[in-house]
Image (cartoon, rainbow, N blue to C red):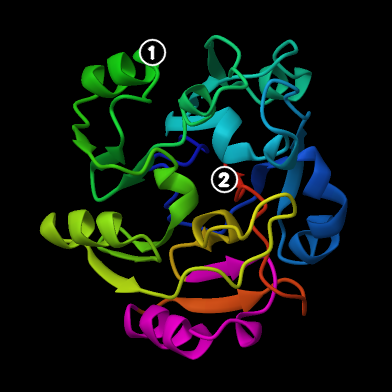
Amino acid sequence: MNRFIQNPNFPNAPVRRAAIGQRYSGLFEKPLSKLGVELFALAPCISLPEPVRSHADLQLHHLGGADFLFSSNGSIPEWMTELGLNVGRICEPGSHINHDAALCALRIGGLCFHNRNHTHVKLRQALDTIGVPIIHVRQAYARCTVCVVTATAAITADAGLYKALIRHGIETLLIDSGFIDLPGYDYGFIGGASFLLSNNLLAFAGSLDKHPNGREIRNFAFRHQVDTIDLTSDTLADIGTIVPIE
């Protein structure tokens, strides 16, 4: 039986192992270990802007199963090899914003949402090979911007992505922009502050009680038979999400 998560972002069973940016691993190691999750750190990528150098959603794209695309300044981490991952290396992300989002595509409902002008050619080729169409949207940081709830439900503050998701059959809750910390920027995004830990548990990097739409978010998830859990009591923080592996 394949132990790896087959559908990117959507574990069918409780997550056992996941990748996270090194900057955030210490803060979330304890609360996630209590939930049975072992974290594997991604070293900061110095080609990315300093505030997001440790954002997993800019460095690692899960294609499905053991297959990943990875972008970093350094070599492929030993833990990836030890876990038996098939990792395709792409060019280092550049400091220019056009390159930062090369892997930051949103996978949901058998589709991929991304600004195709920013999608890395190797990601386009890989998605074409596995039959996943790319839906062109204006937002390059599509994965950061969307909290995935189920394969047919999502949450975002991005009006353009909201319309695109609705148009493709994804029920979507539109929330207020802001109220999510990301030092160095005015605010972060809900997708970078959340991740599924099973098919019915949605975790947040911080407390929904400190977000003006917190109750709506909880109710929306509950209506889709997904519970929520706050990993800290602080304001929500965009940590570049985590990437579930097993």
Disc 1 residue crowd, few under 14, some 14–19, many 20+, Cα 10 Å: some
**Percent of width and height locating residue 62:** 47, 33
- Residue drawn at point x = 31 percent, y = 34 percent: 115
Instruction: Label 1, secondary structure: give it.
Output: helix
| Mark 2 lies on residue | 244
> Is 55 in front, or is 41?
55
* Label annotation for residue 122: 1
Residues at badges 2 and 1 in contact (C-beta under 8 Å)? no
Instruction: Label 2, secondary structure: give it.
Output: strand
**Percent of width and height locating residue 12:** 43, 55
- Residue drawn at point x = 69 percent, y = 20 percent: 47
Side of 236 where 234 appears, left or right: right
Can residue 65 be seen?
A: no
**Percent of width and height locating residue 220:** 37, 82
Residue bounds of the magenta highlight: 201-224
The mark that comes first in sequence, 2 or 1, is 1
Q: Amino acid at mark 2?
A: Pro
Can residue 7 be seen?
A: yes
Q: Quadrant of the C terminus?
A: top right
Q: CA distance from mark 2 to mark 1?
A: 21 Å
> Is 7 in front, or is 144?
144
Q: Amino acid at mark 1?
A: Lys
Side of 133 where 185 appears, left or right: right
Q: Is residue 142 above or below residue 87?
A: below
Disc 2 residue crowd, few under 14, some 14–19, many 20+, Cα 10 Å: many
- Residue drawn at point x = 59 percent, y = 17 percent: 94
**Percent of width and height locating residue 111:** 23, 42
